[in-house]
Image: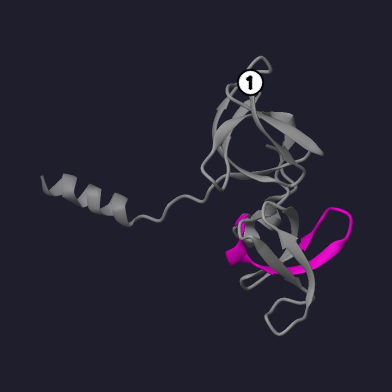
């Protein structure tokens, strides 16, 4: 009995594994109700939209988003490019990594952005064509740290 309690205590105190995050690489991608092109499209997402990998079946990947919605996407439509989606109604993108920097741009909810760099709790973001500025991580979902920047060139 002591062995079972010890194992349970260790399981409850062990840090959770980091989420396996990917981002959409196509300009637009369909999320389907099942693993195949014959399944219904349940929603569509644009480039750099971050998705958490939940499962795999052949060339199809079951994914979840920041609203805990789930669906399936074809593997080749995803990449390891670090990205975030804005989860607040609006988010200030600043000229530098900190509140003391002026607002350079305002992003709307569900705007997805590529992450270029990280300084503390600030992400340098881009729309894929130009660098927009810096955004605080608390108004985003997706990218979670420097290790993802280092791994972004790898295969799925």
Q: Is residue 121 above or below residue 130?
A: below
Question: Which residue matches tag 1?
Answer: 40
Residue sticking out furthest to the front: 89
The structure residue drawn at horizontal position 77% and vertical position 80%, both measured from the top left corner, is 102
Residue sticking out furthest to the left: 1
Number of numbered discs: 1
Residue 90, given in percent of the width and then of the height, sits at: 67, 63
| Left or right, 136 with reference to 131 | left
| Left or right, 47 with reference to 17 | right
**Snapshot quadrant of residue 96:** bottom right
Residue sticking out furthest to the right: 129
Residue 145, given in percent of the width and then of the height, sits at: 61, 61
The structure residue drawn at horizontal position 12% and vertical position 49%, both measured from the top left corner, is 2
Magenta-drawn stretch contains 124: no
Residue 38, given in percent of the width and then of the height, sits at: 66, 14
| In front of the other: 61 or 28 | 28
Magenta-drawn stretch contains 131: yes
Q: Secondary structure at mark 1?
A: loop
**Snapshot quadrant of residue 59:** top right
Q: Is residue 9 above or below residue 120?
A: above
Residue sticking out furthest to the top: 38
| In front of the other: 107 or 80 | 107
Residue 92, given in percent of the width and then of the height, sits at: 71, 70
The structure residue drawn at horizontal position 54% and vertical position 35%, both measured from the top left corner, is 70
For the record, the magenta segment spans: 125-141
| In front of the other: 5 or 69 | 69
The structure residue drawn at horizontal position 40% and vertical position 56%, both measured from the top left corner, is 15
| Left or right, 87 with reference to 112 | left
């Amino acid at each position: 009995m002591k062995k079972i309690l010890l194992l349970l205590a260790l399981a409850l105190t062990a840090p959770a594994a980091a989420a396996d995050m990917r981002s959409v690489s196509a300009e637009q991608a369909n999320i389907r109700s099942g693993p195949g092109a014959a399944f219904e499209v349940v929603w569509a997402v644009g480039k750099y939209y971050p998705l958490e990998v939940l499962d795999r079946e052949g060339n199809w990947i079951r994914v979840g988003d920041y609203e805990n919605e789930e669906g399936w996407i074809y593997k080749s439509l995803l990449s390891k490019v670090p990205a975030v989606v804005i989860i607040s109604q609006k988010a200030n993108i600043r000229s530098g990594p900190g509140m003391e920097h002026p607002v350079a741009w305002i992003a709307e909810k569900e705007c997805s952005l590529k992450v270029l760099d990280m300084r503390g709790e600030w992400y340098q973001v881009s729309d894929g064509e130009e660098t927009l500025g810096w955004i605080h991580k608390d108004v985003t979902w997706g990218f979670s740290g420097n290790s993802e920047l280092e791994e972004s060139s790898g295969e799925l």
